Image (tube, rainbow, N blue to C red):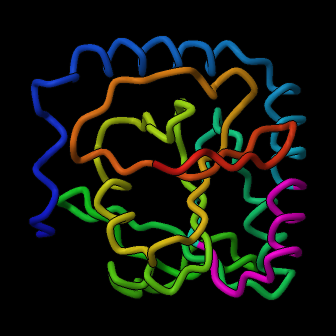
Amino acid sequence: MYREYPGHNGPVHSAAKASRRHDLTAARLARPADAIEAARRDVCAAVLERRAAAAWRCVGAYVPMRTEPGSTALLDGLTQAGVQVLVPVLLADRDLDWAEWDATSQRAGPPLGAAAIGRADAVLVPALAVARDGTRLGRGGGSYDRALRRTPAGIPVAALLFEGELVDELPSDDWDMPVNAVVSPTGWYELPRG
């Protein structure tokens, strides 16, 4: 078990976070399917453009849920560009192992170990919202807060969002790991550091 992470059930902001998660999830569920697909195309284009400029060789990413702005087309586009794409495999303790994305089978390959994310030149993470200071609100399991502690310092860690999900502020706790960029349908945006 990864011991540096104190747990996601702390009392500090749990009620505020739960309320925001509820509202943001409801907004995503109400989003029309064609709007989701249009956003996914634009987010994919923005990430692939950034990848080409930065020449990433390995990217940590994720297989999106039905209402998320990420896409398997993005994973496939990265793979077709010669990038090794690592996707998470949830472990019993909610930590993340990583496996290589196979565009042909549309599945993750064999697990590579939790430390594999340390190979990444960039990491794309899911989020329900991100504050302008980099605070990321996820689904509440703490999995990415653990995994991001294993990434190389200074690499791009970008949350994929719909328009309107970059907000002024969000509740956070000491163990929350910030992101330093967001990608929305209008493009890739760096966030101020520190």
Taking the spot 74% from the left edge, 46% from the top edge, the residue there is 189
Quarter holding the N terminus is: bottom left
Q: Quadrant of residue 107?
A: bottom right
Q: Quadrant of residue 74?
A: bottom right
Taking the spot 61% from the left edge, 49% from the top edge, the residue there is 64
Above or below: residue 133 compared with residue 163: below
Above or below: residue 107 compared with residue 43: below
Q: Percent position (x, y) of residue 113? A: 34, 84
Q: Percent position (x, y) of residue 130? A: 54, 34
Q: Is residue 39 left or right of residue 133?
A: right
* Prevailing secondary structure of the magenta residues: helix
Taking the spot 56% from the left edge, 71% from the top edge, the residue there is 155
Q: Percent position (x, y) of residue 128? A: 53, 31
Above or below: residue 120 compared with residue 8: below
Above or below: residue 145 compared with residue 48: above
Q: Is 182 or 8 nearer to us in this picture? A: 182
Asked if the magenta segment contains residue 48, the reply would be yes
Magenta segment boundaries in residue numbering: 45-59
Q: Is 110 or 157 nearer to us in this picture? A: 157
